[in-house]
Structure formats: C-alpha cells, structure tokens
Amino acid sequence: MNLRHALLALQAVTSREVAKFVRQGGRLASALVRPLLWLVVFAAGFQNVFGVSIIPPYETYIPYQTYIVPGLLGMVLLFNGMQSSLAMVYDREMGVMRLLLTAPLPRWYLLFCKLLAGTLLSVLQAYVFLIIAALFDVGVPLSGWLYALPVLVLAGMMLGALGLLLSVHVKQLENFAGTMNFVIFPMFFLSPALYPLWKLEESGATVIHFLATWNPFTHAVEAVRFALYGQWSPQSLAIVAGCLAAFFTLAAWGYDPQRGMLKRSGGKPG
C-alpha cells in the first residue's frame, strides 16, 4: 500500500465526514442535549439520592455531578459511534459505499479511515461537552483533559468499531432505530456511567452487576474516569483495546464480499 495514497485517502474520508458534520448544523446540539440534561436536570434531582463514597480514582467525597461526567463523556462517544453506523447504512443505500470500497486500497484500511474520521468528531464533541461542564463548575481537573485525550480516542474508536460492525447487519435505515435500542440503552444503563457498580452488588442485583462487568462500555467509562484524574486503569484499557481489535476485525470481515456476511446474505457492499 502506497503511503502517499493511504494518506490522501485518509484526508479525503476525514474531510468528507467533517464537511457533513458542519453542514448538519443541529448535529452538535443534538449530541450535547442528552448529556447536558443528565448533568443539569437529572443530577440536581438525584444528587441527594445517590451518595458517592470515596472510591478510586477519587480521594474525597464528590458531588454526583462530578461522578457522572465520565459516563456522560462516554454517552457522547457512544451516540456518535452509533450515528456513524447510521451514516454507513445510509451511504450503502445511496451507493456511496460502493464507490468507497472499490478504491484501489485495502478494504480494511478504507474502513479504518471511516473509523478514524468518526472518532475525530466524537472526541471533538466530548471536549465541547467538557467545556460546557466546566461552565457549570463541575470539578474535573484541567490536567485531566490532557490525560484523557488518548483514552477518549481509544474508547471512541472502540465504540465506532462497534458501530461499523452493527452496520454490517443493519441492511435498511428503517431497521436502524430498533437495532440501536437493543444496543445503546443496555450498554449505557448497564455501566457505571450513572451509579457505581458496587451499589448494584450491594443491592443484591447480582445478575445486573455481572452483566455490567462484562459490558465493554463499562470499561470505556472507567478508563476515562481514571484518566481524568491523571491515573490509569490497566484492566479497563486492555479490555477496551481488545474489544476495538475484535469489533474492527469482525466489521472488516463482514464488509468483505468474498468472506463476510454480505456474501452470505447475498448483499453488495454498495
């Protein structure tokens, strides 16, 4: 693979995704409405209900608003990853995917370019949310913004790769909403995004606690949480990286008409 051609393809795919994002003026606002509702409205009501003990990476008691910031960052990444999946389905119906995947470059690399472009938009939206959260005096250290960058990129790529994998199975836009309901909401609520996992275990919800520990989104949120306070969670980082590799490999295999699911279903990549 020629390096110059590879970089030109990455630039072209990224420019297209950014241009689409800029043209869709309400996309940023819609991406931020959900986490801001939780931060401003729901957190105000739940602050006296959920007490957060001193657990790593925190060294003292923290307000509920501070606890949920990493989970809400994960929400931004999760929803944008699924939005990228929707865009893939749309491009396939419109025939754009046919043009992209027939370019003289490895198919896995073209999908990787789509993944990187989507992750760039996810991370930018996450930092916009952090800026807004700072305006509401949510106590996240500024140094954590830098520490969190590589973790947000890794988590965004993992969730974007999951979106790519889902786009293999979702053949029509009409089926997208139902499929997403079975992915987004279970992943988000079966995680420590809104409440610590030890509370589930303490309340006797053993099955839910077990499912939450096996949820990749759980480890994405925990990795971001530790990074925001200048710490690392090796187990969570390893799980997120492993899921990224697995999801992307399966997605690339699914988009290969010679071996993947598109062949078995009789479909075409475009």
Image (cartoon, helix red, strand yellow):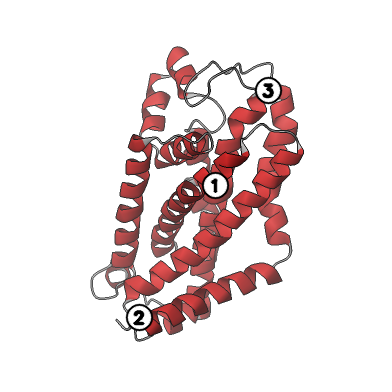
As shown in the figure, which amino acid type bears the numbered disc 1?
A: Leu
Foreground label between 1 and 2: 1
- Which quadrant would residue 29 be assigned to in this image? bottom right
Q: Which mark is residue 146?
A: 1
Observer-nearest of 127 and 91: 127
- Residues under labels 3 and 2: Cα distance? 52 Å
Residue occupying the point 39% across, 84% down? 5
Q: Which mark is residue 46?
A: 3
Judge from the rendering whether residue 111 lies leftward or rightward of residue 61; answer left or right. Answer: left
Q: Front-most of 157 and 93? A: 157
The C terminus lies in quadrant: bottom left
- Which mark sits nearer the N-terminus, 3 or 2? 2
Most extreme residue toward the front is: 143
Query: Which residue is painted at 58% across and 44% down in the image?
Result: 145
Query: Which residue: 34% across, 48% down?
Result: 241
Precedes in sequence: disc 3 or disc 1: 3
Residue placed under numbered mark 2 in the picture: 3
